[in-house]
């Protein structure tokens, strides 16, 4: 199995496992590494980049003790893990906890309930997830697994990675300093200097990087599972392997109806399992990842990361790249997404109790009267983002704790709008700037509510796609389309076999419809997984209230990190 940013693991077959307790120890610490002939210090877990892989079985209890020896506060999010009744351990800073301060420790303690497949973990404080991330693998209780590998895709400004195939990004400059400089000017940060697979950029960045190439060795004449994770901070990715067909079988740890493709499309935050079958010949093949963008006017990292798939005992350096789509090939992306259908049929809620329609926008925020001109360089203002024209601002304490103790005054308000407060032609010519309202506004949902959420993209500033991630839940993606959503389009929804995700792309100039059952109490972050968009306000918090039964209520909190 592999995760985008290729990490390949070897799995046992036909193994029956029983629930147990798995212990892991994370030390957050600095490490000096070299990429693209540049040496710099990054934040890591246990000195590893990407970080250590967590591997558990269905229904296991997982205990991870995190000790922070870095210079800034940090928290860890277990991306895609439901955290059923244990929202305290979900991880986003100032939503479910305060950051673990330097010199302190915190223990995450939760049980994996009703899940199996490829997920991942990452820092959820500032931009630390650029280098702090790893795979979270949940093995089925009984299954015949083929040989598996993980691939993590990333970006390289020293800023990304691939899980079991982790695609990621890398910046030659210090990411935190770069973000601070951009924030001071009110503009987006620089694009990355390279993309990465399992933390390495590959062969295509000049002689300096040829040795920084991930290699994955597999047996000939066999079927292999690749676990892919897109750990990049800012970009959706294409991924393929020269002369190989990829069979997609799982996305976000939920099974899909298998289909074949030469290239997969994977959004930031998403995970995916694919099968490949090797021939009888020994040989080496290039794996490659490059950016996809639905907004050609926005600068992107247009480089290509590569890694080598070694079949048998081959150690050759192959020359031929897979035939990946172009950077702006939206037609290919649409065709790929049309093939994604859920394996389980008839499970989606066919009736709904509550609908929310939420616009997802970039914004230009007015320059404050007392601000300098140097701090307002984004269309004579500051870059912002919003949902229903509310630009989210983190409080200075935990929203979950404030909700649990009834001490929400001064922390958040419960007036996040159910529908857009300003109605306009969302995907048409943009109106005069809608100066988003900054604030910490949440939306409260009663336990057991059958939810429908319409995410509506807009053309404000620029029409672009947004990978939206909901903590604490999977949701059914029942519909999507271009233009403005209206209620008549509900007749086109797929209520039989829609895919189930925890992260989904809202198409540029379009909309996406989700349904889920709100049966997990807690404070759940719902946000764009492009970190720049998140950092300037593209998120909300959904609070799901406790149910009536003890099994429907949050467990009491542990001793949480102090704010």
Image: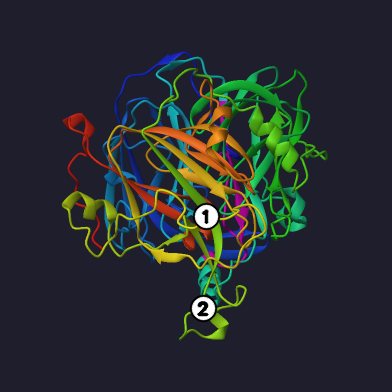
- How many numbered dots are placed on residues in this image? 2
In percent of width and height, residue 416 lies at 37, 54
Q: Which label number is shown at residue 367?
A: 2
As rendered, which of 236 and 164 lies closer to the eye? 236
Q: Quadrant of the N terminus?
A: top right
Answer whether residue 396 is magenta in the image: no
Q: Is 364 placed above or below 473 here?
A: below
Q: In which quarter of the image is residue 163?
A: top right
As rendered, which of 332 and 146 lies closer to the eye? 332
Badge 1, how many Cα within 10 Å: few under 14, some, many 20+?
Answer: few
Q: Is 233 placed above or below 432 here?
A: above
372 horizontally vs 60: left or right: right
As rendered, which of 357 and 88 lies closer to the eye? 357
Q: Is 526 placed above or below 538 here?
A: above
Question: Which residue in the rendered view is the most extreme toward the right?
Answer: 319
Q: Is 160 placed above or below 9 here?
A: below
Badge 2, how many Cα within 10 Å: few under 14, some, many 20+?
Answer: some
As rendered, which of 185 and 199 lies closer to the eye? 185
Q: Give the range drawn in magenta.
A: 148-175
Which residue matches tag 1?
423
At 47% across and 84% down in the image, what residue appears? 369
How are the residues colored?
rainbow
* Residue 52 in sight in this render: no
Number of the front mark, 1 or 2: 1
In percent of width and height, residue 79 lies at 43, 42
Distance, label 1 to label 2, CA atoms, is: 24 Å
Q: In which quarter of the image is the C terminus?
A: bottom left
Among numbered discs 1 and 2, the one appearing first in the sequence? 2
**SS state under label 1:** loop
């Amino acid at each position: 199995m592999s995760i985008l940013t290729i990490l390949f693991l070897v799995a046992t077959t036909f193994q029956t496992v029983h629930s147990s307790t798995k212990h892991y120890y994370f030390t957050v610490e600095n490490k000096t590494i070299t990429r693209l002939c540049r040496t710099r210090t990054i934040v890591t877990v246990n000195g590893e980049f990407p970080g250590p892989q967590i591997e558990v079985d269905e229904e296991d209890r997982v205990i991870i003790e995190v000790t922070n020896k870095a210079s800034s506060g940090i928290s860890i999010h277990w991306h895609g893990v439901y955290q059923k009744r244990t929202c305290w351990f979900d991880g986003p800073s100032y939503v479910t906890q305060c950051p673990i301060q330097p010199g302190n420790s915190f223990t995450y303690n939760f049980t994996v309930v009703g899940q199996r497949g490829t997920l991942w973990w990452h820092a959820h404080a500032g931009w630390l997830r650029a280098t702090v991330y790893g795979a979270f693998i949940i093995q089925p209780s009984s299954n015949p697994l083929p040989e598996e590998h993980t691939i993590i895709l990333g970006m390289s400004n020293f800023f990304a990675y691939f899980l079991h195939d982790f695609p990621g990004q890398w910046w030659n400059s210090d990411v935190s300093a770069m973000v601070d400089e951009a924030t001071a000017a009110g503009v987006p940060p620089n694009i990355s200097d390279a993309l990465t697979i399992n933390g390495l950029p590959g062969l295509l960045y000049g002689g300096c990087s040829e040795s920084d190439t991930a290699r994955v060795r597999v047996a000939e004449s066999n079927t292999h599972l690749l676990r892919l994770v897109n750990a990049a901070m800012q970009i959706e990715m294409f991924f393929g392997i020269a002369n190989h067909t990829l069979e997609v079988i799982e996305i976000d740890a939920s099974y899909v109806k298998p289909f074949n493709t030469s290239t997969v499309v994977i959004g930031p935050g998403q995970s995916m399992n694919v099968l490949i079958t090797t021939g009888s010949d020994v040989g080496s093949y290039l794996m490659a990842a490059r950016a996809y963008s639905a907004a050609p006017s926005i600068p992107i990292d247009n480089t290509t990361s590569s890694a080598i798939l070694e079949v048998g005992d081959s150690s050759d350096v192959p020359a031929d790249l897979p035939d990946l789509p172009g950077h702006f090939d939206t037609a290919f992306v649409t065709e790929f997404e049309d093939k994604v259908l859920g394996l389980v049929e008839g499970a989606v809620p066919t009736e709904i109790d509550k609908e929310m329609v939420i616009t997802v926008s970039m914004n230009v925020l007015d320059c404050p009267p007392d601000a300098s001109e140097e701090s307002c360089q984004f269309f004579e203002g500051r870059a912002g983002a919003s949902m229903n024209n509310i630009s989210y601002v983190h409080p200075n304490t935990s929203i979950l704790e404030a909700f649990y103790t009834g001490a929400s005054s001064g922390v958040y308000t419960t007036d996040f709008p159910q529908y857009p407060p300003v109605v306009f032609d969302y995907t048409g010519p943009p109106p005069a700037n809608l100066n988003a309202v900054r604030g910490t506004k949440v939306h409260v949902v009663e336990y057991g509510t059958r939810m429908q959420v319409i995410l509506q993209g807009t053309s404000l500033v620029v029409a672009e796609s947004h990978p939206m991630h909901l903590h604490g839940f999977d949701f059914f993606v029942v519909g999507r389309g271009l233009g403005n959503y209206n209620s008549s389009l509900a007749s086109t929804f797929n209520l039989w076999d829609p895919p189930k995700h925890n992260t989904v792309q809202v198409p540029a100039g379009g909309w996406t419809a989700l349904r889920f059952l709100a049966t997990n109490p807690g404070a759940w972050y719902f946000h764009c997984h492009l970190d720049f968009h998140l950092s300037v306000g593209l998120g909300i918090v959904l609070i799901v209230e406790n149910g009536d039964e003890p099994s429907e209520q949050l467990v009491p909190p542990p001793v949480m990190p102090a704010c």
